[in-house]
Amino acid sequence: MNITAALSDGRKLNCPQLTVKERAQVRKHQRRAARAPKASGHKTAAYAKVAKLKAREADRRKDWCEKTSTMLARSYSLVRFEKLNIKNMTRSAKGTTEQPGKQVKQKAGLNPAILAQGWGLLKQRTEHKAPGRVEDVPAPYTSLRCSACGWIDKNSRKSQAEFVCSFCGFTCNADTNAAINVAAGQGGIPRPRRSAGAGGMTAATSRSSIREPQPT
């Protein structure tokens, strides 16, 4: 994941996580714990070091969510979040013996990455600090709709970062384009496609949106 969230004004927000060095330390201690005899002091010590690093990451995430939610609540009269079902997104892919899951290893690695973004906590703290000024926008089509003309086409989403409208040619960062749609409340069931130039950037200065980038 390149960014944690995108604002409709073009800004990108990143939740601090473990550094490359710290992640290497986690893997090292996990390997040591796996090799150590069961119920041994070495195993306990290794797991304790892993837990300490994970707690450090959680503290950073909480601090970032507090500061970012305060900024949003103070800066905007209305904050719209793309509605994501994080519980379903992080559900185990193991499946059952009769119906085994697919890409289990990849999903197991993706789930912690999703939870590390702090999306749920950020929305929760923003709602607490801006009561009555936080809204949800259905996620479907927010990343496929052109924020300039309203055209919806999956081929317009060229990559995780690039959006080029197949109808009007509008070019934008893909997450920023989706955030503008969220700010305008354009999500869920597709609305009638408009002609090129009929739309435009609809996010007002008093409005913000949070678009949580979809993992790839």
Image (tube, rainbow, N blue to C red):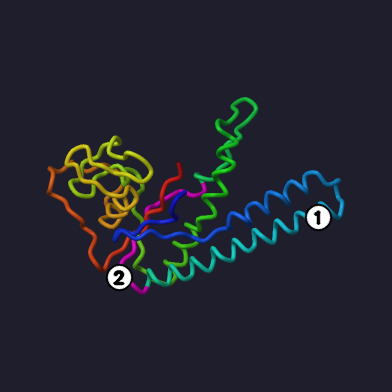
Task: Specify few, some or many for label 1: CA neighbours under 10 Å numbering under 14, 14-19, or 20 or more.
Answer: some
The residue sitting at 38% across, 43% down in the picture is 160
**Amino acid type indicated by mark 2:** Ser
With 107 as the anchor, is 160 left or right in this view? Answer: left
Q: Earlier in the sequence, mark 2 or mark 1?
A: 1
Residue 169 vs residue 122, the one in the foreground: 169
Residue underneath mark 2: 77
- Viewer-nearest of discs 2 and 1: 1
- Three-letter code, disc 1: Thr
Q: Residue 23 appears at what percent x and percent y? A: 62, 53
Residue 54, numbered label = none
Q: Read off the residue under disc 1.
A: 44
Q: Are marks 2 and 1 in contact (CB under 8 Å)?
A: no
- Would you place residue 87 above or below residue 120 in this image? above
Name the image quarter holding residue 76: bottom left
Q: Which residues are magenta?
A: 74-87
Badge 2 marks a residue whose secondary structure is: loop
Quarter occupied by residue 129: bottom left
